[in-house]
Amino acid sequence: QVGATITGIRIVAQVESAGNTVTIDAALRAVTNVAAEPTDAAITGGAITQVSVTADTAVSQSKTGIAEVVASGKTYYILITATTGAAADIILQACEFSVTEI
């Protein structure tokens, strides 16, 4: 809803590391629709602390303290990037937005 404030994000995942290092990064981003071409940018203060594990792990990583006011013409999403070693995998279970309604 335009005017609401995004105050946090959270990702939930399960890592099978197979003894390798697995890293997960996630960041709140916005695409702004403009005439020239849509722009895609990170939201200031919207990135989680990197998850880095070497064992099978249940992941629940949050970022709070975000103060992004939802604007007309913007689309918000969470960009998740990860690295794995051989035989490792990540099961992404959820992405959550915390929002304060107006």
Image (cartoon, rainbow, N blue to C red):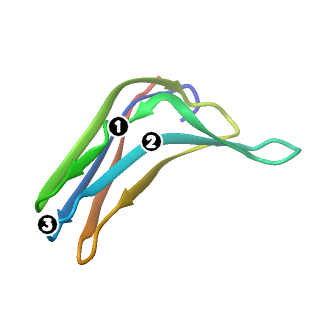
Read off the residue under disc 3: 19
> Disc 3 vs disc 1: which is toward the camera?
3
Q: Residues within 10 Å of mark 2 (few under 14, many from 20)?
A: many
Report how far apart the C-alphas of labels 2 and 1 lie in the structure. Answer: 6 Å
Question: What is the residue that sits farthest to the right in this orientation?
Answer: 36
Q: Residues within 10 Å of mark 1 (few under 14, many from 20)?
A: many
Report how far apart the C-alphas of labels 3 and 1 lie in the structure. Answer: 23 Å
**Is residue 54 found left or right of 81 in the rendered image?**
left
Residue under the image location 54 percent in, 32 percent down? 43
Residue under the image location 23 percent in, 78 percent down? 87
Q: Nearer the viewer, residue 92 or 22?
A: 22
Residue under the image location 26 percent in, 67 percent down? 91
Question: What is the residue that sits farthest to the bottom in this orientation?
Answer: 87
Coordinates of residue 94 in the picture (x, y in percent): 30, 56
Report helix, strand or loop for mark 1.
loop
Report how far apart the C-alphas of labels 3 and 2 lie in the structure. Answer: 26 Å
Residue 97 sits in quarter: top left
Please name the amino acid that badge 2 sits on.
Answer: Ala
Q: Nearer the viewer, residue 85 or 1?
A: 85
Q: Residues within 10 Å of mark 3 (few under 14, many from 20)?
A: some
Please name the amino acid that badge 3 sits on.
Answer: Gly
Q: Contact, CB < 8 Å: mark 2 with mark 1?
A: yes
Q: Nearer the viewer, residue 53 or 61?
A: 53
Read off the residue under disc 1: 48
Tag 1 or tag 2, which sits nearer the N-term? 2
Which label is found at residue 27?
A: 2
Please name the amino acid that badge 1 sits on.
Answer: Ile
